[in-house]
Amino acid sequence: MGRKPCCDKEGLKKGPWTSEEDQKLIDYIQTYGPGNWRSLPNKAGLKRCGKSCRLRWANYLRPDIKRGNFSFEEEETIIQLHSILGNKWSAIAARLPGRTDNEIKNHWNTHIRKKLIRMGIDPVTHGPRLDYFDLSSMLYTPQNSSLLNLPAILLNLQNLLNPELLRLATSQNGIPNFSRIQNQNLSNILVNGPDHPIPTSQTVNQVVEPCMQNMPSFNGLLCASSTDNSGFMSNNSYQSFSNGSSFSTELSPLSSSLLHPIDSSPTYLNSHTSTEDEIDSYFSNVENLLQTSIL
DNA sequence: AAGCCTCACAACCGCATAGCA
DNA sequence: ATGCTATGCGGTTGTGAGGCT
């Protein structure tokens, strides 16, 4: 004997709910409570299956649902939880009062996922994307001497680094020839960001680790910063950069202080929308600038 | 103005699982 | 222990709005 369908498909309405249907469902649930979803449609006078009623109530009609745009803190929380829980939308929703799993899932797929991709972060692993940018040509062109590598690396880290700490680190650690480049306005790019943002690259993780070994003060430089919803880097995201794309399995307390940016300046973490053409153009400009700065 | 395209979000579908008889 | 049912969950699809050509 096969499993009975959750509801009799005959004569049941599908598709968008009308305001009359919504009102019937609200009236019924306010009077009797949700109770048995299977029998609810008949009792409430709805030609819908119980599943559809439950979904409509849970995702749209429930009085405690928070509508409207996701805040920066909410997005940060989602990213952080997703890095730990994966696509466990209901578990994520449980930690975001007023948000439904469906809403979070949709927001992830339509907004957050794309933002992470634009930033060069794999939305599945929360580590650097391996298929997005190949900086090896930039780092190892014949014109490049090895001295070019670190500034190039740092340019690509500008999304991740607190500029003040970056300046401190570069001055304290005496990166060869870097001060000369700074004198030629490269520091402005590092600190203020270019007109267009650059995403984190596939090679960032590969090149940062040796840097970190040589420069212990780099640990702790990675920071989250944003003043609006346009750009962000979650704690786990930058943790994953700093420890080789693995992250703590222990969920840190989701206090707002943890999520607060170190620097509220909107300038250096500038990840507004950019096309791949713009990104290509940006890298081309950076390469030219570096070459003219050093030669 | 019309057709096409893209995006965001609501809703659906099928599977998993908990709970109960 | 087993089978059935209701509910929960996550992936996918459908639809409408807005932008673009």
Image (cartoon, coloured by chain):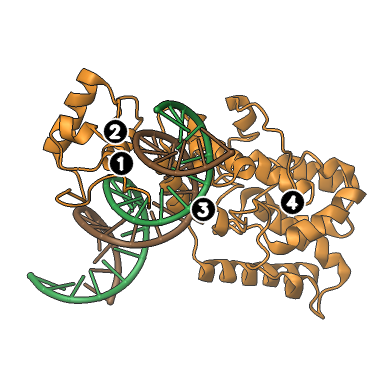
Chain colours: A orange, B green, C brown
Dot placed on the residue nearer the N-terminal end, 1 or 4: 1
- Residue drawn at x 66%, y 39% is A235
Residue A51, disc: 1
Residue assigned mark 3: A113
Tell me if residue A88 comes above or below residue A206 in the rendering. Answer: above
Q: What residue type is labelled 2?
A: Trp
Instruction: Tell me how far mark 1 sits from mark 4, CA to CA.
Output: 40 Å
Labels 2 and 1: the sequence-earlier one = 2
Residue A37: percent from the left, percent from the top?
A: 29, 33
Relative placement, left or right, of A283 versus A65 is right
Please provide percent x and percent y for residue A249: 72, 38
Quadrant for the C terminus of chain A in the image: bottom right
Q: Which is nearer the eye, A247 or A209?
A: A247
Give SS at disc 4: loop
- Gap in angstroms between the C-alphas marked 3 and 2: 33 Å
Lower position in the chain sequence, tag 3 or tag 2: 2
The secondary element bearing badge 3 is classed as helix
Amino acid under label 1? Lys
Residue A266 coordinates in the image, percent (x, y): 55, 42
